Image (cartoon, rainbow, N blue to C red):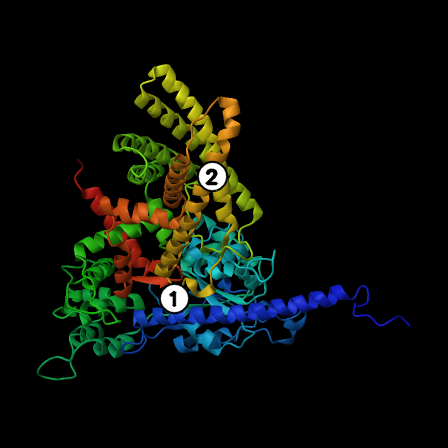
Amino acid sequence: MPPLSAEPPAGRSAPIGRAAGRAVLGDTLAGVAEQLAHAVAARWQREEEQRQVHDPYPLPVRWGAVAEELTDHWANIRRLPAGAARGGAHGPLELGGRLDEVVEVYRRIPSGRLVVLGRPGSGKSILTTRFVLDHVASRSSSDPVPVIFSIGAWDPTAITFRDWLTAQLIRDHPGLAGTAAPGGPSLAAALVEAGRVLPVLDGFDEIAGGLHRPALEALNATTLPLLLTSRPAEYATAVAETDVLTSAAAVELTDLTLDDLADYLPRTTRKARGGNAATTAWHPVLSALRERPRGRGAEQLAAVLTTPLMVTLARAVYSDTPGRDPASLLDTHRFGGPGEVEDHLLETFTATAYRLRPEHRPDGAPRRGFDPERAQYWLGYLAHHLTRLDTPDLEWWRLGSGVRRPARVLVTALLTCVVVGVVDCVVGLLFDSLSFQIAEGLTTGFLSGLISALAYWLLVAGGNTAVPPSGMRVKVFGRAGASGRTARARLVLGSLCGLVFGLGYGFQHGVLKGLLQGTGPLGMLSFGLYDATFFGFVFTLGGGAALGLLALLETPLDIRSAVNPVGLLRTNRRTVFAQVLIWVPAFGLLAGVGSALAVRPLSVLLGPLVWSPGASVKLGLISGLCVAIGYAFALSAWGQWVVFSRIWLPLTGRLPWAVVAFLEDAYQRGVLRQAGAVYQFRHARLQDHLARTYRARRAAAPTR
């Protein structure tokens, strides 16, 4: 009999350890999923309240069956085993319903895969929001968390579906970039792989036309339960090119009826004064639609008021705005067809949303006023910007991407040059004369701008990308968030930029010193070469070490840190400030102390070098501040926001100076909505209309 031991028998510890590890991971993911569910519910509850879909009651959203060729075999949808289909239990499921039944209908589908088709404005977004809220409210702890993804931003030829889901989750919930165990996948990836996320994919039709087929093929390569929305024509075309969404049932949203309009519109406006108190301004319009349905005006208006979008716009323009008569919508001289009526509602909606009136935001604070015409122009630029990027997501860190690449590089370099030059001149006055510092500030600013342009082109503009928000904060102790490869890459980049800057700064410093001492051209050249070698060595070491240090000290934020775009912007601003607080002393010490230590060995190679402790302090202080400024402007999301959204775009008139206030105000007015860390236009039709109007206005503007 073997002796008793605290050690487990050989070969038994690993399986037990793996089982325990899986249990711990499962518990961790369950807790993270609960946090995610709360965050998702809070976000879309605010969205539904902002949209005012319950005032006075939700518009009816109903759906019915679609053509059989747009659905998979019912045996596949029912997940029947081989041979079971011959038993007769493979007929169609009853999937018709209305908005408050959407989760119940979805749960009738054994495969958990549903396609919802609907034409523009038919209520697909309302349905997805209600689906998420009702599903979260009724889910058990083991059910996946429904999360809405704007699938129009997915390029299936560039990134796999699961990787894209992971990236979108991390973008909207930065805390999911963390890992449950050292060296393991991110929490976002673990949630997706464990099936704890139910993708609600909104806008299949918004994927670029040439990518519909590969997108559908990529979705068919997975077995994930999902809900997909699309316009009917785009989905039917994709199905004709490849196949239906595997194991997916499909339904199509139906039009609103005249009875729906008669029930809804009169309850959205005031009663008429005098006469019959039950009569409203909508009654003559509804009477015309019912009594003269073949009349031209009634026929074209009836064709428009069949979707929740157009009814909502009509309500905003005529019910919620005093002094407007909806009977004007029947004017055939003003409107030559349904398209002109729709354009009128879209155009007037924006003007109505920005009408100047004494009103307050929901929190009781006075709402900031924006001139309606200017607001429409700025919104048009934003819509045009999104159209160019081919995405519905208005990401604050990509607003500068609408500027041409050479201009982006030039603007970034110019602002870095000006700020660094001023800082160098002001701080340097503590050590040297004004004339010397003005000259040094000019050359230092120029070199800093040049280095910023180089780094910005290599890492950002050259690939026509944008700097994403890091979603990180500096953590001095604990697990490092960045990989060793990232740290090494930043070390190499920092060393390269430090070398270029050091050579240029040292040469101009030496030439300027020789000029002030009157040594002549040969002496100035000698001073320049000596100082270029000295400062090149110092800045190479300092730049690489400081940038690598920042990479090693990054760690993920809490999952609830970014519930909206403004929250993520503020978080990234704090990140940049924290990085600067690390960078300035780190680079300053490396440069200052390094320069003092480098004097003796470099004197052996270059000859006697004159260097004082005061020179080390000045070098460390100024270089730390200036290099941090260059890094923030060129290589951080918040810095790029400042450069373009707070300075360049407002300076050129394309955006207001108070960009955040404008975007938040547009959200409060119902023009924009929030989807995680990004804004979106409330309706895709509104975005298209504003973009067309902006381009037409730019084309009609006189050239100078």
Q: Identify residue for label 2.
A: 593
Real-space Cα distance between discs 2 and 1? 63 Å
Q: Identify residue for label 1.
A: 124
* Amino acid at pointer 2: Val
| Left/right of residue 680 with respect to residue 326 in the rendered view | right
Q: Is residue 463 visible?
A: yes
Is the residue marked by circle 2 packed among few (<14), some (14-19), or many (20+) residues within 10 Å?
some
Residue lying furthest right in this view?
1
Give the residue at x 76% y 65%: 13
Q: Nearer the viewer, mark 2 or mark 1?
A: 2
Q: Give x and y (percent) for residue 63.
A: 41, 72
Residue lying furthest left in this view?
274
Secondary structure found at label 1: helix
Q: Give x and y (percent) for residue 387.
A: 34, 49
Q: Quadrant of residue 320?
A: bottom left
Circle nearer the N terminus (2, 1):
1
Where 260 sits versus 436, above or below?
Answer: below
Where 576 sits versus 260, above or below?
Answer: above
Q: Nearer the viewer, residue 659 or 434?
A: 434
Q: How many marks?
A: 2
* Quadrant in the picture for the N terminus: bottom right
